[in-house]
Image: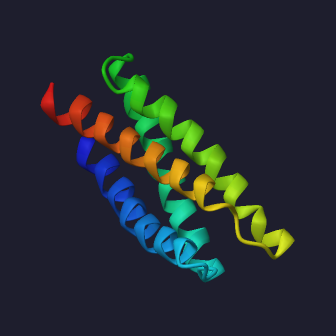
Amino acid sequence: MIWLVTAPLLVALLGGAYVGSLHLANRPPPAKVALIHGIIGTIGAALLAVLVWWRGGGSLVPSAAIFGVVIAGGVYLFSFRKREALPKKSAVLIHAAAAVIAFGLFVYGGFMQ
C-alpha cells in the first residue's frame, strides 16, 4: 500500500517543481498543468489519509497533517487564477517547502521505520 501512496505524491512533487519554477520566473504556469498537479497531489494525500487510518495512526500522522495544510495552500495559490494575478513568490516557496517537508516525513515514516 505504501507504493500506491508514493507514486502520486512523487508525481505531484515533480509537477510542483515545474509549476513553481514557472512562478518564480514570473510566468504563469498553464492552468491545466497546475490543476493536474493539485489533483494528483490531493489523490496522494487522500490515499495517505487512508493509509494512516488503516495503520491506526503512527509515524505517518505528521506527514498527513502537513499535506492537509499544503492542499489548503495550493487552493489559495490556485485562487490567483480567478484574479488573473500571480501569487507572491514567498507564498509559492512556503507551499513548496511544506510539501517537501511533508514528503520527507512520509518517506521517513513509511520506509525508514
Rendered residue at 77%/61% (across/down): 79
Residue 15 in percent (x, y) is at 43, 69
Quarter the N terminus occupies: top left
Q: Which quadrant of the view contains residue 48?
A: top left
67 left or right of 112?
right
Q: Point out the residue furthest to the right here.
A: 83
The number of discs equals 0
Rendered residue at 29%/40% (across/down): 104
Q: Nearer the viewer, residue 63 or 77?
A: 77
Q: Which quadrant of the view contains residue 63?
A: top left
Q: Nearer the viewer, residue 27 or 55?
A: 27
Quarter the C terminus occupies: top left
Q: Nearer the viewer, residue 17 or 45?
A: 17
Q: Point out the residue furthest to the left here.
A: 112
Residue 86 in percent (x, y) is at 71, 71
85 left or right of 47?
right
Position of residue 54 relative to residue 90, above or below, is above
For the question of whether residue 1 can be seen, the reply is no
Position of residue 68 relative to residue 39, above or below, is above
Rendered residue at 56%/61% (across/down): 39
Position of residue 61 relative to residue 66, above or below, is above
For the question of whether residue 53 can be seen, the reply is yes
107 left or right of 26?
left
Q: Nearer the viewer, residue 83 or 14?
A: 83
Position of residue 82 relative to residue 42, above or below, is below
Coloration of the structure image: rainbow
Residue 21 in percent (x, y) is at 46, 73
